[in-house]
Amino acid sequence: MGHKEKKAYLAAIRKRYRKGNKELKSRILDEFCAVCKYHRKYASNLLWQPFRKKRSKTKKRGKRSIYNQSYILEPLTKIWLSTNQMCSKKLKAALPIWLPFYEDEYGQLLEESKNKLLVISASTIGSFEI
């Protein structure tokens, strides 16, 4: 039985378990343990836990990324594709070499974006979903 099936089964019997008398609860708990292969105490705790709503995607904690902007990601993506999708550590080393060729091909970059591309770390480059 997969995780989703166990979760659905738990949701189906939780209400019945809470409303039942001691004898009914014991039978439901035995059945739940046998079907899901849980220990009795863990199963009992699951049946008494409140329903949990799915958390909506909340904002990430911490400072906003200064690199996740189109005027930085666009040149970075084009250079990455031109270098045959080089790994982030090698791409970091290759950026100073490739930036002049990028500017010849696509036009002059803003000074701010050029500086950010030159100081970006390899781990930050690797975290982007390019």
Image (spheres, rainbow, N blue to C red):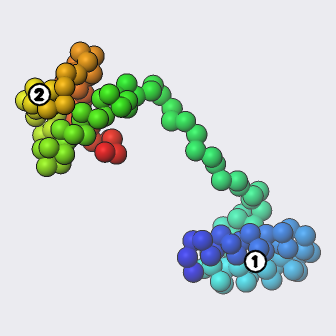
Q: Is residue 91 above or below residue 23?
A: above
SS assignment at label 1 = helix
Q: Position of residue 27 (x, y in %)?
A: 80, 83
Q: Which label's residue is closer to the chain start, 2 or 1?
A: 1
Q: Is residue 130 above or below residue 59?
A: below
In the drawing, what numbered circle is on residue 123?
A: none
In the drawing, what numbered circle is on residue 104?
A: 2
In the drawing, what numbered circle is on residue 29?
A: 1
User: Residue drawn 9% across and 30% down?
Assistant: 101
Which image quarter is the N terminus in? bottom right
Q: How many marks?
A: 2
Question: In the rendered view, does 37 fall on the left or right side of 46?
Answer: left
CB-based contact (under 8 Å), mark 2 and mark 1: no
Q: CA distance from mark 2 to mark 1?
A: 71 Å
Q: Comparing marks 2 and 1, which lies closer to the viewer?
A: 2
Amino acid type for the residue under numbered disc 2: Asp
Q: Position of residue 38 (x, y in %)?
A: 62, 75
Q: Position of residue 47 (x, y in %)?
A: 75, 67
- In the picture as drawn, the residue positioned furthest to the left comes out as 97
Amino acid type for the residue under numbered disc 1: Leu
SS assignment at label 2 = helix
User: Residue drawn 83% across and 72% down?
Assistant: 17
User: Residue drawn 25% across and 40% down?
Assistant: 77
Question: In the rendered view, does 80 fall on the left or right side of 126?
Answer: left
When asked about the image quadrant of residue 51, the answer is bottom right
Q: Is residue 89 visible?
A: no
Q: Is residue 33 visible?
A: yes
Question: In the rendered view, does 112 fall on the left or right side of 106?
Answer: right
Name the foreground residue: 60 vs 25: 60
